[in-house]
Image (cartoon, rainbow, N blue to C red):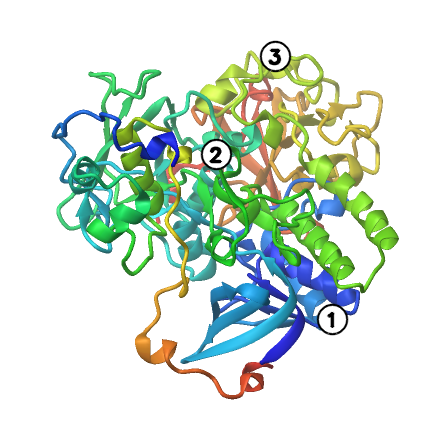
Amino acid sequence: MNSVNDRSRDIGPFVPGADDDMLICRCEEITKGEIRQAVHDGMWTITEIRRYLRAGMGLCQGQTCSRLVKGIVARELGVSPAELEPATSRVPMRPIEMHVFANEAREVDQHES
Amino acid sequence: MKRYDLIIVGAGPSGLSAAIEAAKKGLDVVVFDENEKPGGQLFKQIHKFFGSKEHRAKVRGFVIGQQLLDEADEAGVKVVLNATVIGLYQDKEVVVRIGEEICHYKADAVVIATGAAENMVTFPGWTLPGVIGAGAAQTMMNLHGVKPGKRILMLGSGNVGLVVSFQLLQSGCEVVALVDAAPRVGGYGVHAAKVARTGVLFYLSHTIVSAEGDECVTGVTIAEIDDKFNFIPGTEKHFDVDTICLAVGLSPMSQLLKMAGAKMEDNPKRGGQVPICDEYGRTSIPGVFVAGDVSGIEEASSAMIEGRMAGIVAAEYLGYIDDKVMETELAGLDKALDGLRQGMFAPKNRGKSIEKTEEGIDISQNLLKKGFVGDDEIERFPGVTHRKGIHPVIECTQNIPCNPCQDVCGKKCISIGDNITSLPIAVTDSECVNCGMCVASCSGQAIFLVDEDCGDGSATVTLPYEFLPLPAEGTKGIALGRNGQEVCEATVVSVKSLKAFDKTNLLTMRVPKEYAMKARFFRVKTEEAAV
């Protein structure tokens, strides 16, 4: 475990901010205040934030907000964003309808020109 | 499962270049791209590229895109569009969504050339319709022929912000301000200068306080910031705008590599999460290569060279060429890439404050802070000289890797020498024949042909003009200075649009001779312009 994730570290109390109601993750409608509060609730990694709030889990899959979320979490923890481990990358890389995801092509060659 | 020697993800400049290089060496290559058109960002790039001949300098981006597609076709590369790679698994299994189906492919080698995505910044109102990425604005204008808005504020003075601002002006939008939190313009001075001379005001050390509007953007407030990024009270400025463009950097789209298990690092100098790779794009996974912005943000010219490198190392990895052939070919590309990575804006100089050119001349501070070279600064650069008759005035004042002006002048009036980043020198003992090729070839639109004294109290200034409609001969208007402010009355003497100029029109205007070295843009008088 690296020092960033040393949960015995005191990051101080949650201090409300003037821009806490600003949307950060537009797809899942998560605000800056919710993300900051989540850090004080003990969510110190991007993976935890994703599971706890669903920030970055919507239609754009964090394409817009992942960097912003990372910045907010890092600032709350008092570390550099580069020190935070990024979220896990998983299949599918892009949002995809279940009926497509389950539809395995039988003959690949037909798609090629 | 269908097998290929090489699967490439992304049909942008680097992916296509890798495909061409590998296919030429006999590999069976397929390129998947999630977009409906190939070329990545190239087809949005309507400006002329920098560099030298080997980097396809002075060719417009979309033309380079077409050249690459033709080359790929000739080399036998398959490009599959609307094909989204959704997974990269062990043993190089590539899973692709094509239409309504999931297809599985297997490759012996993979090149990831997925490029980058635009960054965003937050401020109250940033989620309002009308706040868009600069890349999105470019897509709307240059691919779909749609004006993003009428009155626009641009945030970001890097090359993307500067180039897109100019394109917005070309498409008929009004750019009310160019704003950057940094204290200095981030992009090429020549890009800034061509925007500033049209009258766009630059606000450095400023950023957006808030965007206003209930249902969409109706206005924006900016304010100056101190060195700790706090707003300075009392410095607020308000603009009525319907669009705010954000050009605040790019982040590599490297998720496929992370998924595949490549060793990654968070490297702010390369733009964020990037794979750890060697100079030719070899990642920690044998047979998985990277090229272009996904391995570190640069630009299209270097991406094309990186792509070719990745194609060559992939061919060697699979045994299609031996290591000697590889070394020879890479050595040539090393040199080409090194040429692009020189000068004031080289990756190694990122974040550094450079005060003097390689020649030891003080860099224009106005250019860095306001976007234009001051009238009192311009004389110290070697491209600016005075003599009788028509002669080129080269207002190229920063060391950037670019030399087409030297190559096109048949009369050797312009000299850069072997060092591609050297400032161009106006050679005084050569004879300028007023052919205009230097003006049209300058990707930075920084060359003017000036006759400082026509003998009747007037002077003529020929400038690059890429706006429509073209003013007719005899049109009266206003000459603007480098700073975009009115300097004097001007009359259009001629507008030349030769094929060799490649859509850069040469507008010659007559001005009183005392303004020969000040007048640098032509604006049609507003009552005539109001259409």
User: Where's residue B115, x and y in %?
Assistant: 52, 52
Q: Secondary structure at mark 2?
A: helix
Residue designated by label 3: B362
Q: Name the N-terminal-most of marks 1 and 2.
A: 1
Q: CA distance from mark 1 to mark 2?
A: 39 Å
| Disc ID at residue B74 | 1
- Say if B209 sits above or below B42 in the image: above
Q: Secondary structure at mark 3?
A: loop
Q: Nearer the viewer, residue B149 or B522?
A: B149
From the viewer's perspective, is B122 left or right of B114?
left
- Say if B478 sits above or below B316 in the image: above
Q: CA distance from mark 1 to mark 3?
A: 49 Å
Residue designated by label 2: B268
**Nearest to viewer (mark 1 / mark 3):** 1
Q: Name the N-terminal-most of marks 2 and 3.
A: 2
- Please name the amino acid that badge 3 sits on: Asp
Q: Residues within 10 Å of mark 1 (few under 14, many from 20)?
A: few
